[in-house]
Amino acid sequence: MSFQFTEEEWDTLEGIPEDDVVALSAYLSIVKPEVVDRRALLEQCIPRALRHCRQHGLPFTRYDREELEALPPHQFQALERIQKPLLFKGARGMIVAGRLAWLRYYKGEELDHHPLIYMLPSLLGPLSRLAAEKVGSGD
């Protein structure tokens, strides 16, 4: 079954501009459809972003700390298992691991307008929910 936003999640995301959704989908290698349905395109982005996290880590910054700490514990732990912080536990460890991922994988990229970095705080809730579902199912 494909990923779908809850209505509450979509309520917080529906204001994201189409250009940002298209940029994120292009970054995650999702082909832009002829007619863009922002919700459907973003729903395709969440599993791809999670896969990206497994391969390269997610580029969390200190500005993501509050959002990370606000996640339900089981969702945070699922993301933490995927992000694999090495030096510290908790939000600090996720941020340090994100910074290392940023330096290792994202070096040389224009980071000020990088679609994943820019949209990560908005997508954190759905991303962590999917991570918890995947960890719970053994995927």
Image (cartoon, helix red, strand yellow):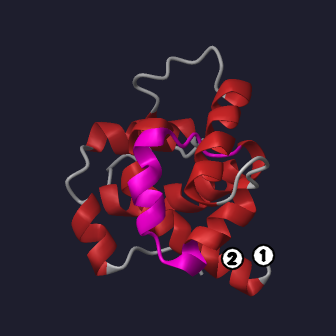
Q: Quadrant of residue 17?
A: top left
Q: Quadrant of residue 95?
A: top right
Q: Residue at x 40, y 51 (%)?
A: 121
Q: Secondary structure at mark 1?
A: loop
Pointer 1 or 2: first along the chain: 2
Relative to the observer, which residue lies in front, 87 or 61? 87
Question: In x, y percent, where is residue 58?
Answer: 61, 45
Q: Would you place residue 113 above or below residue 12 in this image?
A: above
Q: Based on the picture, tell me whether residue 58 belongs to the magenta stretch.
A: yes
- One can see residue 120 in this view: no
Q: Quadrant of residue 20?
A: top left
Q: Secondary structure at mark 2?
A: helix
- One can see residue 106 in this view: yes
Question: In x, y percent, where is residue 15?
Answer: 19, 54
Q: Is the residue marked by circle 2 packed among few (<14), some (14-19), or many (20+) residues within 10 Å?
A: few
Q: Which residue is mark 2?
A: 134
| Stretch in magenta | 57-75
Amino acid found under the numbered disc labelled 1: Asp
Relative to the observer, which residue lies in front, 106 or 49? 106
- Quarter of the image with the N terminus is bottom right
Q: Based on the picture, tell me whether residue 107 belongs to the magenta stretch.
A: no
Main secondary structure of the magenta stretch:
helix
Whether residues under marks 1 and 2 lie with C-beta atoms below 8 angstroms apart, the answer is: yes
